[in-house]
Amino acid sequence: MTTTRFAPSPTGYIHVGNLRTALMNFLIAKKSGGTFILRIDDTDPERSKQEYVDAIQEDMEWLGLTWDKIERQSERLDRYVAAADKLREMGRFYECFETPVELDLKRKKQLNMGKPPVYDRAALALSEGDKAKLRAERGDGHWRFKLDQARIGWTDGVLGDISIDAASVSDPVLIRGDGQFLYTLASVVDDTEMGVTHVVRGSDHVTNTATQIQMIQALGGTVPTFAHHSLLTGPQGESLSKRLGTLALRDLREAGVEPMALLSMMARLGSSQPLELRHGIDEIAEGFDVNQFGSAPTKFDVNDVYPLTGRLLGEMDLDAVAADVATAGVPDDMAAQFWSVIRANIGTRKDIAGWWDLFENGADPVVEDEDKEFVAQAMALLPEGPFDDETWGAWTKAVKAETGRKGRGLFMPLRKALTGQAHGPDMSAVLPLLKVIKARG
Ligand code: GLU
């Protein structure tokens, strides 16, 4: 039975980078009828906020990435204490007392000597007496997991066969001096106890994975299948880390991005499979394969998601937008006609109200200087309403006969005069909906 999890730390709003992780884990579970866990990594009481926990759930629900179970690390601290005790008994866990400044100094010295900045394990040499003394002076120490200094290898769903020499990695700190558990251990305990079979996360976690594999093995768990997707970059390949704050999922929602447009894109971006616009999460799951993703950094341009949003809306039936159409003030008996006229011409749902307003209240005409006379002549020929779908054809024919204009020179000034815009639906469909014609003067 497949079990996956998405494990955000609730220290901020989740963004497109997190979405990639969430979606991949969701799809793996979905595709195989497995279980998807939303795990809130809130072991840091200072930085974790309930506000963000709520926001994460809201964002996931907006996208339809619903979870089968939700877990919170802050409610499982006793499990982590038990695991830490077990590691201690096995001699794989040791207390260290170096201050951050001392550690920094050690690192700098190593780097100066051309050595990798790996923790030198000085604390292993401390006697019980030394430790008692240090504890009295400095308070409780922090606890490190003693790595077995061998090569740690695994077959990664994205990176293929990969291995890391544990001797090149510092023994990871799992409990801080203030007693706070770090997610590194918490995650191992949770993944093991919750039966997580597949872990997809960013390639920034590759070294963690190596050390966590040893922890899982030490604690007698089963190592899940790991896959590390590449990190997103901006359109020019620039780092996104500073900009991710502006790519929060809630901001995209606010801007009118459609969930399925974003999901269709994120399920394919960086993979060898072509991007196809999907209308339901099941459709996306069907073709999803994490092994198709490449390890190279993946370019993401938020501007690409808007055309997809527009295309998706254009393909939607009235049912899918009925609430927005009603909210815009469109009477029920006109909704179908209205939607069929505008559907191919909207960027986001927010544009719906704008079109209805235009039809109801008319648009301020846009008339270029050189078209002033022409537009005045044409308006004189426009019959009184109501219009039907023949009106535009008959009218422009009459205007053409009178003015000699044709083609774009004939149609564009009229479109701009009637709708105030250079683009929009077929004018023969627009005209019957247009109640007010400000260009009549
Ligand atoms: N809370 C961790 C993070 O957001 C989870 C990493 C993991 O998936 O194990 O980076």
Image (spheres, rainbow, N blue to C red):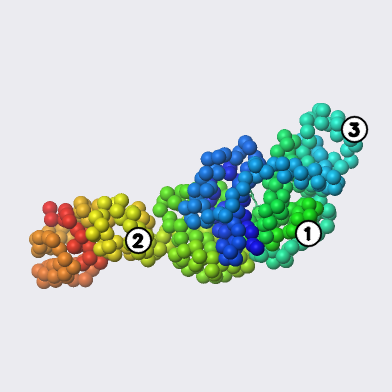
Q: Which residue is mark 3?
A: 129
Question: Nearest the camera: 247 or 5?
Answer: 5
Distance between the alpha carbons at the discs numbered 1 and 3: 35 Å
**Amino acid type at mark 1:** Ile
Identify the residue at the far top of this view: 137
- Tell me, yes or no, whether the two marked residues, 1 and 3, touch with CB atoms within 8 Å: no
Residue 390, x across and y down, in percent: 16, 69
Q: Residue at 63% of width from left, 67% of height from top?
A: 291
Q: Specify the label residue 319 is tagged with.
A: 2
Residue 397, x across and y down, in percent: 14, 71
Q: Looking at the picture, does residue 283 appear above or below residue 48? A: below
Residue 214, x across and y down, in percent: 78, 54
Q: 312 left or right of 341? A: right
Q: Residue at 60% of width from left, 62% of height from top?
A: 34
Q: Quadrant of residue 298?
A: bottom right
Q: Residue at 57% of width from left, 70% of height from top?
A: 272
Q: Quadrant of residue 216?
A: bottom right
Q: Residue at 15% of width from left, 60% of height from top?
A: 375
Q: Specify the label residue 152 is tagged with.
A: 1
- Tell me, yes or no, whether the two marked residues, 2 and 3, touch with CB atoms within 8 Å: no
- Give the secondary structure at mark 2: helix
Question: Nearest the camera: 81 or 145?
Answer: 81
Whether residue 126 is visible here, answered yes or no, is yes
Residue 12, x across and y down, in percent: 55, 43
**Amino acid type at mark 2:** Asp
Q: Looking at the picture, does residue 146 appear above or below residue 292? A: above
Density class for disc 1 (Cα within 10 Å; few <14, some 14-19, many ≥20) is some
- Can you say which quadrant of the picture contains the N terminus? bottom right
Q: Quadrant of residue 81?
A: top right
Q: 209 left or right of 4? A: right
Density class for disc 2 (Cα within 10 Å; few <14, some 14-19, many ≥20) is few
- Give the secondary structure at mark 3: helix
